[in-house]
Image (cartoon, rainbow, N blue to C red):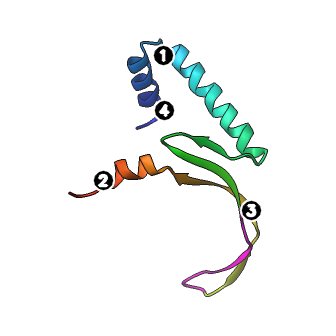
Amino acid sequence: MNNKEFIAAVAEKMNLSKSDTTALLETTVSILRSKIASDNAVSIHGFGTLDLRKKEERVSVHPSTQIRTLIPPKLVVGFKQSSVLKSKINPLKS
């Protein structure tokens, strides 16, 4: 599902115009971006938690040339799914 399809689905489900839905989505993403960038975890009930994680520096080896390269540390966004989402993806078998 791409951005346009997502906006159309939300607009249809909520009986909103596509322009209102686009503004809502842009505002939501902007808030998520700013909160995560300021090192705050964002928890969405029934979906999961987004947070900022630090990846340590590491050495990478090119498979064909065996040249080693140092990859510097960086910050990445991590996601931990909620138990509700996990049970929807992997339902228990009776």
Q: Which element is circle 2 on?
A: loop
Q: Which element is circle 3 on?
A: strand
Give the Cα separation between the discs numbered 4 and 2. 28 Å
Bounds of the magenta span? Answer: 54-65
Residue at numbered disc 2: 91
Residue at numbered disc 3: 74
Give the Cα separation between the discs numbered 1 and 4. 12 Å
Name the disc covering residue 18, or none.
1
Q: Give the residue type at disc 1.
A: Lys
Mark 4 / mark 3, whichever is N-terminal: 4
- Circle 4 packing at 10 Å, graded few (<14), some (14-19), many (20+), is few
Q: Give the residue type at disc 3.
A: Lys
Q: Residue at x 68, y 47 (%)?
A: 41
Q: Give the residue type at disc 2.
A: Pro
Side of 94 where 32 appears, left or right: right
Q: Tell me residue 8's x, y (percent).
A: 42, 23
Residue at numbered disc 4: 3
Q: Where is the C terminus found, in terms of image quarters?
A: bottom left
Q: Give the residue type at disc 4.
A: Asn
Q: Residue furthest left?
A: 94
Residue 72 lies, with reference to residue 10, above or below; the image says below
Mark 1 / mark 4, whichever is N-terminal: 4
Residue 54 lies, with reference to residue 15, above or below; the image says below
Name the disc covering residue 94, or none.
none
Is residue 80 highlighted in magenta? no
Mark 4 / mark 2, whichever is N-terminal: 4
Q: Which element is circle 1 on?
A: helix
Give the Cα separation between the discs numbered 1 and 3. 37 Å
Residue 87 lies, with reference to residue 23, above or below; the image says below
Mark 3 / mark 2, whichever is N-terminal: 3
Closer to us: mark 1 or mark 2? 2
